[in-house]
């Protein structure tokens, strides 16, 4: 994360989560399960996009025909 974007994230998380919730989130990401999620998330996102492309194309085609 660039230093220009970091303050935005900090503000958004501060508005959305309590200090206790943020501590829990940080603890999760420091855990084995959290580290596995971080490591595997790019693959999941890639597979999700691949799975969604046909539906997105169908929706675009449907919208264009209206």
Image: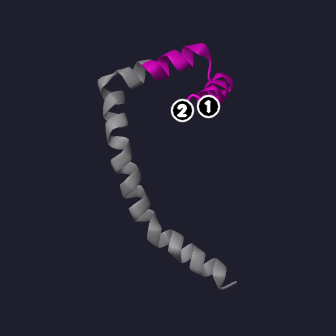
Identified at 39% across, 63% down, the residue is 50
Q: Position of residue 31 (x, y in %)?
A: 34, 22
Q: Position of residue 43 (x, y in %)?
A: 33, 49
Q: Is residue 29 left or right of residue 5?
A: left
How many discs mark residues in the rendered view? 2
Quadrant in which the C terminus is drawn: bottom right
* Residue placed under numbered mark 1 in the picture: 4
Q: Main secondary structure of the magenta part?
A: helix
Q: Is residue 58 left or right of residue 62?
A: left
Tell me the crowding category of disc 1: few under 14, some 14 to 19, or many 20 or more residues within 10 angstroms, Cα based: few
Identified at 56% across, 14% down, the residue is 20
Identified at 55% across, 19% down, the residue is 21
Q: Quadrant of residue 65?
A: bottom right
User: Is 13 one of the magenta-colored residues?
Assistant: yes
User: Is 65 one of the magenta-colored residues?
Assistant: no
Residue farthest bottom in this picture? 65
Query: Spatial distance from mark 1 to mark 2, Cα to Cα?
Result: 5 Å
Q: Position of residue 63 (x, y in %)?
A: 65, 78
* Residue placed under numbered mark 2 in the picture: 2
Q: Please report the bounds of the magenta region as a residue range.
A: 3-26
Colour mapping: one colour
Does the residue at mark 1 contact the one at mark 2 (Cβ under 8 Å)?
yes
Helix, strand or loop at disc 1?
Answer: loop
């Amino acid at each position: 994360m660039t230093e220009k974007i970091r303050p935005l994230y900090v503000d958004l998380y501060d508005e959305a989560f309590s200090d206790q919730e943020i501590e829990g989130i940080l603890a999760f990401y420091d855990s084995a399960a959290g580290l596995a999620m971080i490591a595997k998330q790019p693959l999941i996102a890639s597979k999700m996009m691949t799975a969604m492309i046909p539906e997105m194309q169908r929706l675009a085609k449907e919208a264009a025909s209206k």
